[in-house]
Image (tube, helix red, strand yellow):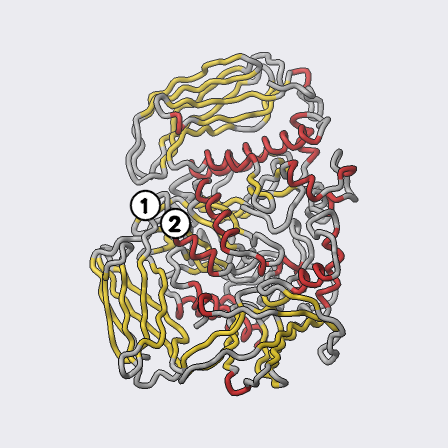
Amino acid sequence: MIRNRDISPLAWELGHAPDKETIPGTFCPAAVPGAVQLDLARAEGYPDYNYAGNYRRMTWMEDRFFTYRTEFEPPRLGPGQRLWFVSKGIDYQYEIRFNGHLLAAGEGMFSPVEIDLTEYLEPSNRLEVVIFPIPKRHPEPADRTQASDVVKPAVGYGWDWHPRLVPLGIWDDTGLQVRNESHVAELHVGYILDDDLQGADLRIEAEGRECGGCQSDWELLDPEGHPAARARGPAGERLTARVEHPRLWWTHDHGEPVLYTSRYRLLDAQGKELECVEQQIGFRRIRLVMNEGAWSEPKGFPKTRSAAPAQIELNGRRIFAKGSNWVCPELFPGTVGEERCKELIDIAVATNFNILRSWGGGIVNKDCFFEYCDRRGILVWQEFPLACNCYPDDPHYLATLEQEATAIIRRLRRHPSLAIWCGGNELFNNWSGMTDQSLALRLLNALCYRLSPEIPFNATSPLNGMAHGNYLFYWEGRDIFQLINDSHFTAYTEFGVPGISPREVLEKIIPPEELFPPRPGTAWEEHHAFGAWDGSPATWLGEPTIERYFGRAQTLDQLIERSSLMQGEGYKAVFEEARRQKPYCAMALNWCFDEPWPAAANNSLVAYPSVPKPALDQVRRACRPLCASARIAKFDWTEGELFEAEVWLLNDRFAAAGPFSFTVTLRAAGQTVEILRWESPAAGQNRNVAGPTARAALPVWDTDRFRVEIIVEGHPEMDACYTLAYRRAACKQAGTAPMNITE
């Protein structure tokens, strides 16, 4: 069992060669964990790969053989002690050699590596890890389909917001570990909560090596450190225990994420402690149930092929899941550490999110991500690393998938934040072509059932009833307001509204002479502002759409401001409408939360590395547990047009709220027009209230936008506001709106 506190790091160096047999001619210092590309770029003085198109200088490295090597003198070993080489992750195909002996050959990046070196130790020792070139199903085209035979993030092979840089190397904690001959190899503390949640039966299963005659001593400590349960018995036998009235783990918006400490001690025959393993666990029940109203539509069977369950039930409460799609915060996941995870998860909590979808095109995160989600009360929808490809049924691939999935499940199943297992991203569609009968998905379902039966399993996202898209503010003649108001889904597990990155990000990635105006063929395109989807008009920059409402921007700051306005209002519209569709709808997860690399424009809420976009605050307001809301028919309005806004009270709390007094006003060009007063009834627990429709003919204003404000008397924390596009009647045609006019 690999525990960070026991790992002694090593000083590594790195070399590369065209084939496995050739010994590298030169070596450079290597950072572990990390990636071979970063070590080589550092040694050869490459410029910042985040700037302009510099990343292209690193793409050749994917076809080389790399050798990590280190030399060390063995530590002094006591009686009954052994020296192990351990690694939490080596990416992707590799051989491990020690003092001239080939000790291991492997494939996969999520299975831990544990090798007993003791029998091969010499006074001076050389350890080598040889990394093979990235696996490719075929040489052409150089796109994500090359990843369809590997259990490895497909995103590195190239995506519409991610450059083609496929990481290789030792990417997770790695080093030497001194162990007793008798030690714990695997530990799992599982439990079954009573139907009424007032008690829990625990089972403690420890797998050990050379543990004959040893004893197990286990105890559970409550959050204050007081004993809550205890069990003892022979090592290797299952222990059982009982906890009465456990304090439950909740998401941060519905309670406290209470954590207990599991402490397992392995004792020798004389009662001497050989090893102590501590883990945090939380008591909660997670279920995925049918959404209210979904059972009856459509009427055919089987139900899993109609509207799939998308309602999360946590500890008996059917909660509305508000969150985002998490992507790895770096192109090279080996560089992601605890502080970076904390920073981003804290932002998610402050945004009123209670769930993050760990997307199947990306990495299965390191332990620090899940540990902090446990502590902050954030649920995790965890996908296996399959995305947008047709993964094969051949024995080699399935064997690798089983190995990797088993390691992932065993590592993550203890975390109370884990809410859903999912086979992968967008596998049931015309570009992937998989079905629920594909052997890879049947295998994953079987493994999750066997190793983690208490956690729900989805074959993929989306399933029938769920939605992916839209990803643009304006699409095929309709804006995001119109699209979402006409939607009817049990869950919106991906939807996007693009926004330009803040100036401080742009200035770090785009040469000054290219900053404005944005043009194809410049760093704007290198950073995916243009041609997001095969050069179609669907670009993340979206200049034609911005011009449609506000005219051509005259400065970079003006362009950023307009793009940010539209991203914020668009995202707010989707999140609030999804909540208004409760209880049939039970989930809203935008695409995406963060970036691994600075995009000039993207759907993300947080620009690289951790720079919140202005839209993030709008999403925070849309996700407040209790707030006013308005269903608005569209984004742009014209002088004299009858404006309408349906007023709502949104309540995701499990407590009644209200009654309240609402006032709706329009503001523009220094004028204020009151158009509605409403005395709302009380909202029941976790229920919304639909109110009246505010109506007013829009006055003549000298502006290009106006605000709709909903004031809740005595409760400013519930107030809502919306900024919408406005044009004079003479400027009704697209692209002719007044320019350079502000409120």
In the image, is residue 544 above or below residue 54? above
Q: Is residue 450 visible?
A: yes
Which residue is depicted at the point 46% across and 54% down?
Answer: 381
Q: Is residue 635 above or below residue 216?
A: above
Name the residue located 46 percent from the left edge and 76 percent from the top edge.
178
- Residue nearest the viewer, comparing 482 with 162: 162
Tell me which corner region of the image, top left, top right, bottom left or bottom right, holds residue 474. top right
Question: Percent from the top left, x then y, of residue 87?
Answer: 53, 71
Per the image, the residue denoted by label 2 is: 377
Q: Amino acid at mark 1?
A: Gly
**CB under 8 Å between discs 1 and 2:** yes
Which is more N-terminal, label 2 or label 1? 1
Q: Secondary structure at mark 2?
A: loop
Count the labels in the image.
Answer: 2
Mark 1 to mark 2: distance in Å?
9 Å
Task: Say if residue 485 shows up in the picture.
Answer: no
How packed is label 2: few (under 14 Cα within 10 Å), some, or many (20 or more)? many
**Quadrant location of residue 181?**
bottom left
As drawn, the label of residue 255 is 1
Which quadrant: the N terminus?
A: bottom left
464 to 200, vertically: above or below? above
Q: Amino acid at mark 2?
A: Gly
**Left or right side of 511 for 81:** left
- Point out residue 435 in the picture as x, y percentages from the top left corner: 53, 62
Tell me: 686 left or right of 732: left
Secondary structure under tag 1 reads: loop
Residue 174 screen position, x and y as percent: 54, 69
Figure quadrant of the C terminus: top right
Foreground residue among 497 and 80? 80
